[in-house]
Amino acid sequence: MKIGNLVFKKIQIEVRNASTGELIINQDLYNTLVDNKVFSASINYNSDQEKEVMERAFFKSVESKKTLGNNI
């Protein structure tokens, strides 16, 4: 997925209780390369509203960088 001028790989994980199967937390991992170095972000949430708020902040942060590279 593209955010700003970077292309991220996104991995979605559901962490569940091994005994009950109850959902404990959701985790979205975002990974890309910046100047040949791995840049990762993790968003952990329990509701869609939490996810939206944290994704909006992360996306705006990435999009606000005019040139990413040595500046991140």
Image (cartoon, rainbow, N blue to C red):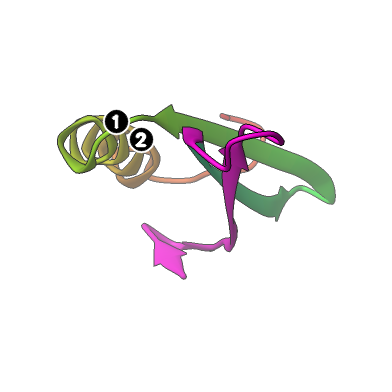
Residue 20, given in percent of the width and then of the height, sits at 58, 36
Q: Is residue 23 magenta?
A: yes
Q: Which residue is mark 2?
A: 58
> In the current view of this chain or complex, which residue is farthest to the right?
36
Question: In the rendered image, which quarter is residue 64 located in?
Answer: top left
Pointers 2 and 1 in contact (C-beta within 8 Å): yes
Q: Indicate which label's residue lies in the foreground, 2 or 1.
A: 1
Main SS of the magenta segment?
strand
Magenta range = 1-25
Which mark identifies residue 62? none
Q: Residues within 10 Å of mark 1 (few under 14, many from 20)?
A: some
Q: Is residue 70 magenta?
A: no
Which mark identifies residue 54? 1
Q: Residues within 10 Å of mark 2 (few under 14, many from 20)?
A: some
Report how far apart the C-alphas of labels 2 and 1 lie in the structure.
Answer: 6 Å
The type of residue carrying mark 1 is Met
The type of residue carrying mark 2 is Phe
How many discs appear?
A: 2
